[in-house]
Image (cartoon, rainbow, N blue to C red):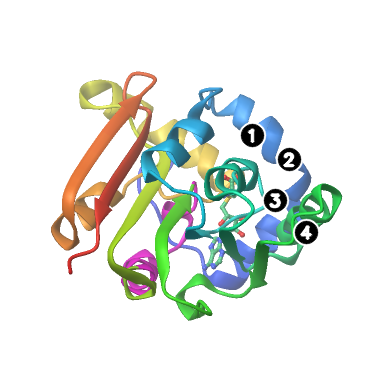
């Protein structure tokens, strides 16, 4: 089993997600995602009614109900994803709920331009699937108003020897599923760029939500 991560190119990642769009819920079970993780992560953004929030890598829209609920009917939820297969499912969900304040865009997150300054941005289980994550993070901060909040929610290796022991299996599993690089530490990328950095871990440190505030 390989113990190093080799980045995939963007087309390979996009095609992988087009193929696995129907498997996101089974993958949540396979990867032991805590039941309330999505709701908890969205709560950590601290959204108010009427605010504008972007989910980067919104996928099939599994976080959209929580984001939509948090900003209410007067707010706007933007979502960007580069997989047509994933977005088709998100669009079907938005249409079935009749949400007219959820706006989804198909493009590489590094190229995304929001139509207005944003109050908040969330990476929803997506940061470590992007080999150019630092460029996407810089773009996310550009899109935020000063004082806007940024959240990264994701899985990670548990701390210490447990993490080192599961790394080979984790790399194997990621290569065969969602292509998330388990070797990066996104919270260390975010912390130096924001004010009021905070991080919470769940399920023995195998999931986390980190957040910060854009400097004014
Ligand atoms: C693991 S899925 C998470 C989807 C969703 N946020 C969720 O929580 O279920 C990662 C998503 O990021 C998207 N993604 C990966 N790289 C991207 C990029 N460069 N630009 C836009 N979307 C990207 C994938 O297409 C996929 O839908």
The tag on residue 118 is none
Asked which quadrant contains residue 10, the reply is: bottom right
Task: Tell me the residue at 28%/31% (across/down).
Answer: 200
Closest to the camera, between mark 3 and mark 2, is: 3
Closest to the camera, between mark 1 and mark 3, is: 3
Whole-percent x and y of residue 85? Answer: 76, 60
Q: Along the line of sight, which residue is nearer the eye, 86 or 3?
A: 86
Which residue bears the numbered disc 2? 23
Q: Is mark 3 within 8 Å of ligand 1?
A: yes
Decide which of tag 2 and tag 4 comes sooner along the chain. Answer: 2
> Is-magenta flag for residue 116?
no
Q: Which region is colored magenta?
A: 125-140
Q: Along the line of sight, which residue is nearer the eye, 4 or 216?
A: 216
Which residue bears the numbered disc 1? 27
Decide which of tag 1 and tag 3 comes sooner along the chain. Answer: 1
Which residue bears the numbered disc 4? 91
Q: Quadrant of ligand 1?
A: bottom right
């Amino acid at each position: 089993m390989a113990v190093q991560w080799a980045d995939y190119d963007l087309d390979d990642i996009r095609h992988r997600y087009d193929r696995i769009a129907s498997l996101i819920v089974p993958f949540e079970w396979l990867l032991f995602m805590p039941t309330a993780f999505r709701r908890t992560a969205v709560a950590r953004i601290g959204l108010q009614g009427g605010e504008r929030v972007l989910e980067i890598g919104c996928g099939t829209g599994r976080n959209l109900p929580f984001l939509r609920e948090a900003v209410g009917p007067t707010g706007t939820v933007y979502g960007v994803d580069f997989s047509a297969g994933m977005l088709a499912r998100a669009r079907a969900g938005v249409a079935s709920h009749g949400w007219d304040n959820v706006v989804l865009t198909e493009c590489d997150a590094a190229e995304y331009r929001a139509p207005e300054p944003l109050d908040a941005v969330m990476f929803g289980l997506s940061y470590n699937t992007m080999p150019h994550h630092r460029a996407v993070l810089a773009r996310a901060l550009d899109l935020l108003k000063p004082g806007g909040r940024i959240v990264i929610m994701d899985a990670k290796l548990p701390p210490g020897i447990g993490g080192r022991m599961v790394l080979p299996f984790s790399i194997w599993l990621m290569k065969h599923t969602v292509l998330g690089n388990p070797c990066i530490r996104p919270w260390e990328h975010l912390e130096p760029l924001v004010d009021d950095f905070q991080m919470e871990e769940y399920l023995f440190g195998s999931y986390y939500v980190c957040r910060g505030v854009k400097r004014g």
